[in-house]
Amino acid sequence: MFLSDRVRRRWHQSENTAQNLEPARRLFPTNRIRDAVYTRRGLKWGIPAMLLAAPYSAAVNLLTDHIEQGGPGWLHLVVLLCAWNALKMLWLGPMSLIALARVRYSEHVQRRAARREAESRGTPDEVLVMARGAS
C-alpha cells in the first residue's frame, strides 16, 4: 500500500468523523461564534470577538491556581478546554481580517468589471450603482 493511499484513507476517515460530530459541534459557544464571524456580515466582528479570549484566559489562571492549592485533577481538562478556546478566539481576529480583505478585494474586482461592462454598453452610472447593490 502506497503512502498516498494511506493518507487518502485517513483523510476520508477524518471527514467522516467531522460529519458525524457536526450536530455536537453546534452546541459549543466558541464554534457558534466562529461560524457567525466567518459569514460575510460577521467578518467585521472578528476583532471584537478576540476580546472573548480574556475571560477564557482568566478562567485558565483561576483554575490553575485552584488545582495547585489541592483541587481535583479533572480540572486539568477544563483548563485545557479554556486554553484551547482562548487560542481559538485570539486566532479569530487576524483570520477574519484576512478574509475580510479578500472579500472586499473580490467585490472591488466585480464592481470594476461591472463598471467597465456598463461603460462599453453605454449604460448610465446610476443604473450601475443600483445593479450590484454596492457603492
Image (cartoon, rainbow, N blue to C red):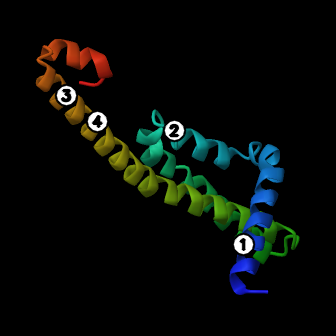
The 10 Å Cα crowd at callout 1, few under 14, some 14 to 19, many 20 or more, is: few
For badge 2, the amino acid type reads Thr
CB contact under 8 Å: marks 3 and 2: no
| Camera-side mark, 1 or 2 | 1
Residue named by callout 2: 39
Mark closest to the chain's N terminus, 1 or 4: 1
**Is the C terminus in the top left, top right, bottom left or bottom right quadrant?**
top left
Q: Which residue has dot 1 on it?
A: 8
Crowding near the residue tagged with mark 2, few <14, some 14–19, many ≥20 C-alpha atoms within 10 Å: some
Residue at 43%, 48% in the rendered image: 47
Say the numbered circle drawn on residue 38: none
Image location of residue 122, percent across then percent down? 11, 17
44 left or right of 127 in image: right
Question: Image quadrant of residue 112?
Answer: top left
Report how far apart the C-alphas of labels 1 and 4 lie in the structure: 36 Å
Label disc, if present, on residue 110 of the rendered structure: 4
Within 10 Å of disc 4 (Cα), the crowding (few <14, some 14-19, many 20+) is few
Query: What amino acid is at disc 4?
Result: Gln
